């Protein structure tokens, strides 16, 4: 139950001076600092749990079991007048997780996209997360570059560079090319950049502008198992068999198509002929590969096209170990940049799952779900079919599914803010939020996990 706020300090021996009027106690700083972006109700039902990570590795595919509830004591907090709030002691819960990914450079990758100026500008945060200071390069064909003056283009390029992204902007190879044709022809620009690079390029990745990697490290590990000195065409299919019926067997671009250097050079030499086919960019690439090499599609586990419209929470709550995300700001909404702070903190613990108590499941970095009827009959080995048309067409890839549960049976707290705090030796803070019905007088609810 929600308790009213009590006054005083967590600890009578706390050496810190009491906050001045209008200040929050330090423990609520992150909540208060996040309020301008989150726009929570003025008063929120708040609870926190401290997580003590055990960086010893864990069985990532299993759902962990913790007997305690994740919620602790909930109290009502006025975000603007929280200087007198007294929080219950934050009792730590030990969770085994993987070590953070090693800090490495990836100069052997060049990535390419084709998109318009507005979408490119809106994608900066996403690209900065996984490309910043990695020594990988990004080539962006700006399809409407002719509609923007040099100052606009240069300023956008500076924004990317200030974010640590090594980027090259190019105009379309031919003014008459469609975006799909530019999606293929960006490879020609990428090859020129690769030829001039100081380090040899092993892989050329053709992406959509909303392809996102929580980290390049697992992608690099996966591709390192293949011989980049041979012809390789790597990717994955759509999860939706209808899309495969319509477009065929190929690397779907949202998951990325990864071309080894020798194959990329063959495609570049034949690009002018391949691009003349007026079809989708992924199809142009596939047909060019099959016409000018003996390479066939190599499926890379962990890549996802994510052809899911509406509510994709079932995917994110399934414990899947995804190398990438896609469609996260169009077909569905997911705060992938904020989610990926978890990957920075503990590697592949992103979306790792634990049961808490008798009715709660944490999908780390995405959600906390509280099930009205408990967990005994809930088959967590099956993905919940939450999105539109989650039918038998998905069974071959990520099915079978369990039934979607409505809000009366499943109460969800979604991650809305996360931050790694250098001031706390790199600790992680996560805010999971359940939005109340304000018209009915309900408050928003916040669960903060302090790692």
Image (cartoon, rainbow, N blue to C red):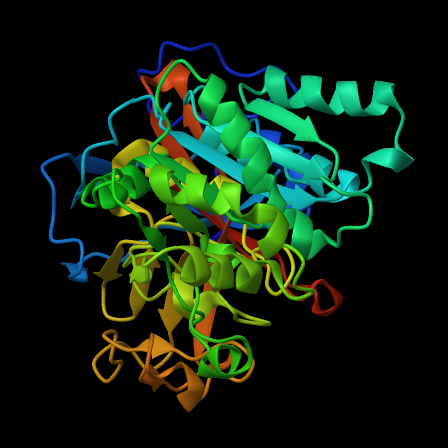
Q: Residue furthest bottom?
A: 392
Q: How many marks?
A: 0
The quarter holding residue 301 reads: bottom left
Left or right relative to 158: residue 109: left
Q: Position of residue 36 (x, y in %)?
A: 69, 36
Left or right relative to 123: residue 118: right
Q: Position of residue 41 (x, y in %)?
A: 67, 50
Q: Residue at x 48, y 76 (%)?
A: 248
Left or right relative to 413: residue 63: left
Q: Residue at x 29, y 70 (%)?
A: 359
The quadrant of the image that shows the N terminus is: bottom left
Residue 6, placed above or below residue 335: above
Q: Can residue 451 be seen in the rendering of this structure?
A: no
Residue 357, placed above or below residue 130: below
Q: Residue at x 52, y 24 (%)?
A: 193
Between 84 and 340, the residue placed more toward the observer is: 340
Between 216 and 421, the residue placed more toward the observer is: 216
Between 55 and 328, the residue placed more toward the observer is: 328
The quarter holding residue 185 reads: top right
Q: Residue at x 41, y 68 (%)?
A: 237
Q: Can residue 33 be seen in the rendering of this structure?
A: yes
Q: Position of residue 70 (x, y in %)?
A: 30, 54
Left or right relative to 299: residue 384: right
Q: Position of residue 112 (x, y in %)?
A: 55, 39
């Amino acid at each position: 139950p929600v308790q009213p706020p009590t006054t005083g300090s967590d600890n009578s021996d706390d050496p810190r001076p009491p906050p001045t009027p209008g200040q929050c106690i330090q423990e609520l700083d992150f909540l208060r600092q996040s309020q301008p972006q989150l726009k929570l109700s003025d008063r929120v039902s708040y609870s926190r749990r401290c997580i003590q990570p055990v960086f010893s590795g864990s069985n990532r595919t299993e759902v962990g079991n913790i007997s305690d509830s994740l919620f602790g004591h909930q109290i009502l907090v006025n975000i603007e007048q929280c200087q007198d709030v007294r929080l219950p002691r934050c009792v730590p819960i030990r969770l085994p997780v993987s070590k953070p990914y090693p800090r490495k450079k990836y100069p052997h990758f060049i990535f390419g996209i084709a998109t318009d100026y507005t979408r490119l500008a809106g994608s900066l945060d996403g690209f900065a997360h996984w490309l910043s200071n990695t020594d990988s390069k990004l080539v962006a064909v700006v399809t409407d570059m002719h509609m923007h003056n040099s100052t606009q283009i240069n300023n956008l390029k500076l924004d990317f560079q200030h974010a640590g992204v090594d980027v090259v902007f190019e105009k379309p190879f031919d003014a008459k090319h469609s975006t799909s044709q530019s999606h293929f022809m960006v490879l020609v620009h990428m090859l020129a950049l690769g030829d001039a690079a100081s380090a040899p390029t092993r892989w050329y990745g053709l992406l959509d502008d909303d392809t996102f990697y929580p980290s390049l490290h697992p992608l690099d590990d996966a591709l390192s198992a293949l011989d980049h000195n041979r012809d390789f065409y790597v990717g994955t299919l759509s999860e939706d068999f209808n899309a495969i019926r319509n477009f065929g067997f190929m690397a779907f671009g949202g998951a990325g198509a990864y071309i080894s250097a020798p194959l990329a050079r063959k495609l570049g030499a034949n690009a002018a002929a391949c691009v003349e086919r007026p079809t989708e960019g992924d199809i142009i690439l596939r047909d060019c590969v099959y016409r000018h090499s003996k390479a066939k599609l190599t499926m890379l586990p962990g890549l996802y096209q994510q052809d899911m419209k509406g509510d994709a929470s079932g995917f994110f709550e399934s414990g899947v170990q995804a190398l990438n995300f896609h469609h996260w700001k169009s077909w569905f909404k997911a705060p992938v940049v904020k989610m990926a702070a978890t990957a920075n903190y503990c590697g592949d613990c992103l979306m790792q799952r634990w049961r808490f108590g008798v009715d709660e499941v944490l999908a780390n970095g995405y959600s906390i779900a509280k099930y009205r009827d408990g967990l005994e009959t809930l088959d967590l080995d099956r993905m919940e079919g939450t999105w539109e048309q989650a039918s038998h067409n998905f069974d071959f890839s990520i099915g079978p599914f369990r039934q979607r549960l409505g809000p009366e049976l499943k109460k969800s707290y979604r991650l809305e803010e996360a931050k790694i705090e250098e001031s706390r030796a790199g600790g992680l803070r996560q805010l999971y939020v359940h939005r109340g019905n304000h018209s009915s007088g309900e408050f928003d609810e916040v669960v903060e996990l302090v790692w």
